[in-house]
Image (spheres, helix red, strand yellow):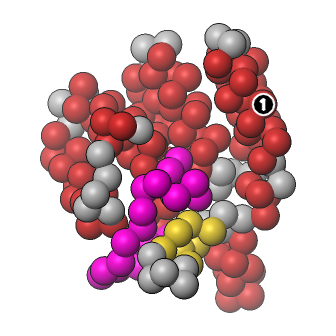
Amino acid sequence: MSKRSRRRRVQHGVRLVQLPTGEWEFRHPRCVRERTEDIEEVYLMLEHGDDELAEETLRWLLDGCSEFIEAHMLLGHVAENEHRLDLARAHYGYAFEIGKRAIPRGFKGNIPSDRPANRPWYRAAAGLLRCLTEQGELKKAEEVLQLIAQTDPQVNLADL
């Protein structure tokens, strides 16, 4: 991969931007922003108990936008509700990793969990923690908790 194509890939991925308040938020790629109405429809499907259609729609959304944190998080949610713990862990974990890659080493800022752009990442972290705990992966769960505590000390994962 050339340096130019690597740069292009990074520019189109999830990144962290500082707000005028000094806080930080995830800036999602254009493909995510273009799918706002679709993800709203998925929430309606889930609300009406149509998990199968929601899962199919989420997979379709990810086919055109693999760094869609919220879509991975919701697939994790669907899988967890169906007691498919390995699949839930995979989707929650992938969503968590997408956001984690955007956070620079040694980061010392606040990424508030109550901001709409950040909330899916924290929800994915909460789901990942549930899966890791249930699977007895306590060391990995502790690593997730440490990063979450570093990025938003005020977050209450139980509320997500």
Which of these two is toward me, 36 or 8? 36
Instruction: Name the residue located 24 percent from the left edge and 52 percent from the top edge.
Output: 145
Q: Quadrant of the N terminus?
A: bottom right
**Residue neighbourhood size for the residue with mark 1, other residues' Cα within 10 Å, grouped as few (<14), some (14–19), many (≥20):** some
Q: Quadrant of residue 83?
A: top left
Q: Quadrant of residue 23?
A: bottom left
Amino acid type at circle 1 is: Glu
Residue 141 in view: yes
Q: Position of residue 104 (x, y in %)?
A: 41, 79
**In the rendered image, which residue does mark 1 sit on?**
41
- Using the image, determine if residue 115 lies above or below residue 25: above
Span highlighted in magenta in the image: 102-121
- Using the image, determine if residue 82 lies above or below residue 38: above
Query: Seen in the image, is 33 located left or right of residue 106?
Result: right
Q: Quadrant of the C terminus?
A: top left
- Examine the structure image and report whether residue 108 is included in the region drawn in magenta: yes
Residue 59 in view: no
Which of these two is toward me, 80 or 151? 151
Instruction: Name the residue located 38 percent from the left edge and 46 percent from the top edge.
Output: 125
Furthest residue in direction front, as rendered = 21
Q: Position of residue 17 (x, y in %)?
A: 56, 78
Instruction: Name the residue located 46 percent from the left edge and 29 percent from the top edge.
Output: 88
Q: Position of residue 108 (x, y in %)?
A: 31, 80
Q: Position of residue 7 (x, y in %)?
A: 68, 84
Query: Seen in the image, is 16 located left or right of residue 127?
Result: right
Q: Quadrant of residue 110?
A: bottom left
Which of these two is toward me, 36 or 133? 36
